[in-house]
């Protein structure tokens, strides 16, 4: 189970990291354009779904090749979580390198776009001031607190992985091995 989680977690993590690098390059070319950020986010979440398909593959591989064709929901879910955690950790490491060395102004641009969207939605006065102060606190924590940075980044990817893990575990659970038909 450990080998499966490591192999499929690394494959998934490398895929999501490669996609993230691509989407961030697209976004950085678009500067502070909200459309380029939206396109980047669409690419990013699509890549997460593609990368986390290896959760399904890893559980199925373990069930069929190493566990006699059976797997409980709990064991499948645990294996999927391990794959998800490894892939997510690679994502966090990759984003940490990309952010700190290549895109240190990303969070400032992101905050600028968020505040502009609030203004466009009609927010003004004290509510906008409060939102701006909260955004400044978030920016400060994101830039200066490695734990905050890591947790914030994990929260981007872990929910997607956990959802795919849950679905995969439900689909792939099997109490008895399938009978092989001999013809």
Image (cartoon, helix red, strand yellow):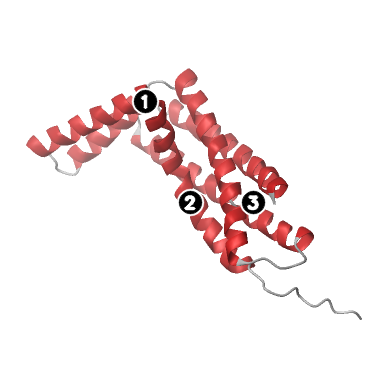
Q: Which label lies toward us, 2 or 1? A: 1
* Residue 12 picture location, percent across and down: 62, 44
Mark 2 or mark 1, earlier in chain? 1
Disc 1 designates what residue? 145
- On the image, the x and y values in percent for residue 136 come to 24, 27
In the depicted view, which residue is nearer to us: 11 or 176?
176
Query: Which badge, 3 or 1, is on the more N-terminal residue?
Result: 3
- CB atoms of marks 3 and 1 within 8 Å: no
Do callouts 2 and 1 mark residues in contact (Cβ within 8 Å)? no
Query: In the visual, does 134 lie left or right of 163?
Result: left
Instruction: Tell me what residue is drawn at x 72 percent, y 62 percent.
Output: 63
Within 10 angstroms of label 3, few (less than 14), some, or many (20 or more) residues?
Answer: many
Question: In this rendering, is residue 153 above or below 146?
Answer: below
Numbered label tally: 3
Q: Is residue 119 visible?
A: yes
Label drawn at residue 54: 3
Marks 3/1: CA–CA distance = 32 Å
Quarter placement of the C terminus: bottom right
Residue 93, percent across and down? 53, 30
Kindly indicate whether the residue at mark 3 contacts the one at mark 2 (C-beta within 8 angstroms). no
- Per the image, the residue denoted by label 2 is 160
| Residue mark closest to the camera, 3 vs 1 | 1
Where in the figure is residue 94, as x and y percent of width and height? 54, 30
Q: Nearer the viewer, residue 130 or 18?
A: 130
């Amino acid at each position: 189970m450990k080998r499966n989680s490591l192999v499929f977690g690394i494959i998934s993590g490398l895929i999501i990291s490669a996609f993230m690098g691509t989407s961030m390059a697209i976004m950085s070319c678009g500067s502070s354009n909200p459309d380029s950020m939206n396109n980047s986010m669409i690419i990013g979440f699509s890549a997460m779904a593609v990368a986390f398909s290896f959760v399904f593959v890893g559980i199925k591989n373990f069930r069929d090749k190493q566990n006699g064709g059976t797997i409980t929901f709990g064991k499948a879910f645990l294996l999927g979580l391990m794959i998800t955690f490894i892939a997510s950790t690679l994502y966090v490491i990759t984003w940490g390198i990309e952010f700190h060395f290549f895109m240190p102004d990303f969070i400032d641009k992101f905050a600028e776009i968020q505040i502009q969207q609030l203004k466009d939605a009609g927010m003004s006065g004290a509510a906008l001031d409060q939102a701006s102060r909260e955004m400044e606190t978030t920016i400060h924590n994101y830039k200066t607190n490695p734990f905050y940075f890591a947790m914030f980044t994990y929260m981007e990817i872990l929910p997607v992985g956990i959802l795919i893990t849950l679905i995969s575990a439900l689909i792939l659970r099997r109490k008895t091995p399938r009978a092989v038909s001999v013809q």
